[in-house]
Image (cartoon, helix red, strand yellow):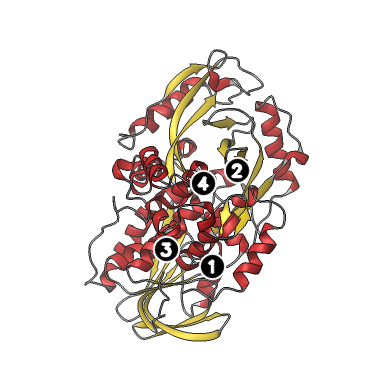
C-alpha cells in the first residue's frame, strides 16, 4: 500500500485491529466517513487469530436458545463464502452419535433447524451415515452406530482481518498498527485522543470513538474520560492443540464429550489436525493467553476417547489460546455465555459519542459492523447507505467463486513455478497473487528463499501491502508457515525485516 498520511481530525477513531474493528473501518470508509484505526499490536494478534477458524452458524448455540444469533450467522455464512472464496471454503462435519450425551432425535432436530433457519442455498444439507461402512469413520476408535454429516465453512481468520483492513485502507481509512490509545477526552462535540507508537505521542481529534478493543474493552472505557457502558464483559479463554494428522480425509469432526461440551477436530495445514476449543473463565487482566495443563489434558483426553491413533503431550506440534470478550449475561457456565454481540452507545447532541462492542463472533462481524454504523448514523447523517453485503474482499473477485479453475489458470500462466506453491499463494491472496508475483516466472525470480516455500517476493508484499513487521506476523498470522519452515527461519526473517525501510 502507499504510505499513509495520518489525519489529525477524523469522523471515527476506532480502537482495536481485530475482526470487529477492521470490519467497522471498512464499512465506515465505504460510506464516505474518514477513519483512523489504531491497534496496540499487530492486526489480529489476539482473539481474532485464536478462533477455531470456522464460519458457522453455531450449531451448539441452539441448545441455549440463541435462535436469532444462529439465523443471522447462517445467513452470513453463505454471504461471506461468496465474498472471499480464496480464504473461506465449505467443510463437512461428521458428528458421531456413539458417544453422544444427547439423544439422536435431539441432535437430528437441531440439525433440521440448522439446515433451514438461514435459507441455505450453497451448502449441502444434513445426511446420515453408518460409521462402520463409511470412509468417514476411518481413524475413529469406535465405529459403531451412525453419524450425522452437516456442512459449515473454514476461514483463515487472521487473513480475514487483514483483508478487511486492506479494503478499508483502499477506501481511505488510515490503519495504524502498533499504536496505542493513551487517553481520550470529550471536547464538546468531538473527542481529543492521545495515541502513541514507537515515534512518540501525538493527538488526534475524532467526532466519534469506536471501542472495538476486544478483551481490553473495559480498559478502553477507563481511558476515555467520562465514558460509561451499560453492559459488562466476561472474559473466557479458548485453547487449541495442533497434532499430527489423526485421520485421513478433508472432513472435520464435531465431538461430544460426556460433560456436554463440544470439541472440533479439523484438518489443518495438510499434515496436522487442529483440536479445540476449551471454555475456561479468565479472571485476570487481559493479556497474551497460553494453554494450561488442564486444558491440554482435556483436549488430549478427547482425542483419546474418539480416535484410534495414540496421541500424547509429546506429539503436540503447536498450541494457541485466546481470550474471548463475551457479553456478561450472568450465565454460570462459561460454555453457555452468549456469543451474541451487544453495542453500547454513550453520547448525545452535546456529548461526542463512544460506541463500545461487547461479544460477537467472526461469522457475524460484517452484520455487527452494519449495526454499529446504524447506531452512529444520527451523528453522521451524510454517511452513505449499507453496502458491504456481497461486496468481495481483496482477492475474492474470483470468477464464479471457482477456486479450482482459478488455480488451474494461474498454473497455465506461470508454468515454471511449482503448482503447490501457486496453489498456496492463491489460497492466501486470491486475485491479489498477481501483484505479489509481479513479473516472476521462475523460482529465481522470487528472490531469497527463507525455507518452507517462503520467498522474498511474498515477504516484501506482506510488508508493503499487509502491515507485516515481524517474523511472527508473517509465519503465524499472515500465514501458518511457522509449522513448515526449518529451524532458524524466524531469526533470518526478523533480520531481513529489520533492515527494510518502514512501510506505510
- Judging by the rendered image, the residue that carries numbered circle 1 is 218
- Judging by the rendered image, the residue that carries numbered circle 2 is 277
Q: Earlier in the sequence, mark 2 or mark 1?
A: 1
Q: Earlier in the sequence, mark 4 or mark 2?
A: 2
Q: Earlier in the sequence, mark 3 or mark 1?
A: 3
Alpha-carbon distance for marks 3 and 2? Answer: 27 Å
Alpha-carbon distance for marks 3 and 4? Answer: 25 Å
The answer to whether residue 491 is above or below residue 33 is: above
Tag nearer the camera, 4 or 2? 4
Q: In the structure shown, which secondary structural element does the residue marked by tag 2 occupy?
A: loop
Alpha-carbon distance for marks 2 and 1? Answer: 25 Å
Instruction: State if disc 1 and disc 4 touch (CB < 8 Å).
Output: no
Residue 230's x, y, as percent? 45, 65
CA neighbours of label 4 inside 10 A, class few (<14), some (14 to 19), many (20+): some
Tag nearer the camera, 3 or 1? 3
Position of the N terminus, as image quadrant, is bottom left
Q: In the structure shown, which secondary structural element does the residue marked by tag 1 occupy?
A: helix
Residue placed farthest to the right in the image? 314
482 and 275: which is toward the camera: 482
Residue 273's x, y, as percent? 61, 37
- Judging by the rendered image, the residue that carries numbered circle 3 is 165
- Judging by the rendered image, the residue that carries numbered circle 4 is 421
Q: Earlier in the sequence, mark 4 or mark 1?
A: 1
- The residue depicted at 42 percent of the width and 40 percent of the height is 89
- The residue depicted at 51 percent of the width and 69 percent of the height is 39
Alpha-carbon distance for marks 4 and 2? Answer: 30 Å
Alpha-carbon distance for marks 4 and 1? Answer: 43 Å
In this rendering, would 158 be left or right of 413? right
Amino acid at each position: 500500500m502507499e504510505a499513509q498520511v495520518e489525519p489529525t481530525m477524523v469522523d471515527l477513531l476506532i480502537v482495536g485491529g481485530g475482526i470487529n474493528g477492521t470490519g467497522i473501518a471498512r464499512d465506515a470508509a465505504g460510506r464516505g466517513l474518514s477513519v483512523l484505526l489504531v491497534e496496540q499490536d499487530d492486526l489480529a494478534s489476539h482473539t481474532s487469530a485464536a478462533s477455531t477458524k470456522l464460519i458457522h452458524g453455531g450449531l451448539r448455540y441452539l441448545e441455549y436458545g440463541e435462535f436469532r444469533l444462529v439465523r443471522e450467522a447462517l445467513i452470513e455464512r453463505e454471504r461471506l463464502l461468496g465474498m472471499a472464496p480464496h480464504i473461506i471454503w465449505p467443510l463437512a462435519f461428521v458428528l458421531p452419535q456413539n458417544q453422544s450425551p444427547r439423544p439422536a432425535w435431539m441432535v437430528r432436530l437441531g440439525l433440521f433447524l440448522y439446515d433451514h433457519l438461514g435459507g441455505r442455498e450453497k451448502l449441502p444439507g444434513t445426511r446420515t451415515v453408518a460409521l462402520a461402512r463409511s470412509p468417514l469413520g476411518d481413524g475413529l476408535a469406535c465405529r459403531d452406530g451412525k453419524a450425522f454429516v452437516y456442512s459449515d465453512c473454514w476461514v483463515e481468520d487472521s487473513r480475514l482481518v487483514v483483508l478487511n483492513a486492506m479494503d478499508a485502507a483502499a477506501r481511505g481509512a488510515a490503519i495504524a498498527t502498533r499504536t496505542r490509545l493513551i487517553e481520550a477526552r470529550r471536547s464538546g462535540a468531538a473527542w481529543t485522543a492521545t495515541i502513541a507508537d514507537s515515534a512518540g505521542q501525538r493527538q488526534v481529534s475524532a467526532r466519534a470513538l469506536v471501542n472495538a478493543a476486544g478483551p481490553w474493552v473495559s480498559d478502553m472505557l477507563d481511558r476515555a474520560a467520562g465514558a460509561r457502558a451499560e453492559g459488562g464483559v466476561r472474559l473466557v479463554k479458548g485453547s487449541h492443540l495442533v497434532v499430527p494428522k489423526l485421520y485421513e480425509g478433508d472432513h472435520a469432526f464435531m465431538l461430544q464429550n460426556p460433560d456436554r461440551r463440544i470439541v472440533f477436530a479439523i484438518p489443518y495445514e495438510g499434515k496436522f489436525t487442529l483440536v479445540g476449543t476449551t471454555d475456561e473463565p479468565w479472571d485476570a487482566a487481559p493479556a497474551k493467553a497460553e494453554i494450561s495443563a488442564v486444558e491440554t489434558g482435556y483436549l488430549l483426553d478427547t482425542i483419546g476417547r474418539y480416535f484410534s491413533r495414540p496421541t500424547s503431550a509429546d506429539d503436540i506440534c503447536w498450541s494457541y489460546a485466546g481470550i474471548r470478550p463475551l457479553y456478561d449475561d450472568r450465565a454460570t457456565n462459561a460454555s453457555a455465555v452468549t456469543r451474541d454481540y451487544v453495542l453500547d452507545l454513550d453520547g448525545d447532541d452535546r456529548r461526542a459519542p463512544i460506541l463500545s462492542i461487547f461479544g460477537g463472533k467472526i461469522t457475524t462481524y460484517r452484520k455487527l459492523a452494519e449495526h454499529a454504523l446504524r447506531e452512529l448514523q444520527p451523528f453522521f447523517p451524510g454517511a452513505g447507505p449499507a453496502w458491504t453485503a456481497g461486496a468481495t474482499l481483496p482477492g475474492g473477485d474470483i470468477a464464479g467463486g471457482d477456486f479450482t479453475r482459478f488455480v488451474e489458470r494461474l498454473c497455465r500462466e506461470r508454468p515454471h513455478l511449482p503448482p503447490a506453491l501457486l496453489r498456496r499463494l492463491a489460497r492466501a491472496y486470491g486475485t491479489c497473487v498477481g501483484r505479489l508475483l509481479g513479473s516472476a516466472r521462475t523460482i529465481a525470480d522470487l528472490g531469497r528463499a527463507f525455507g518452507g516455500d517462503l520467498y522474498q517476493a511474498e515477504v516484501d508484499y506482506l510488508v508493503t501491502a499487509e502491515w507485516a513487521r515481524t517474523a511472527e506476523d508473517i509465519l503465524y498470522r499472515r500465514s501458518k508457515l511457522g509449522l513448515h519452515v526449518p529451524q532458524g527461519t524466524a531469526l533470518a526473517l526478523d533480520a531481513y525485516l529489520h533492515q527494510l525501510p518502514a512501510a506505510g
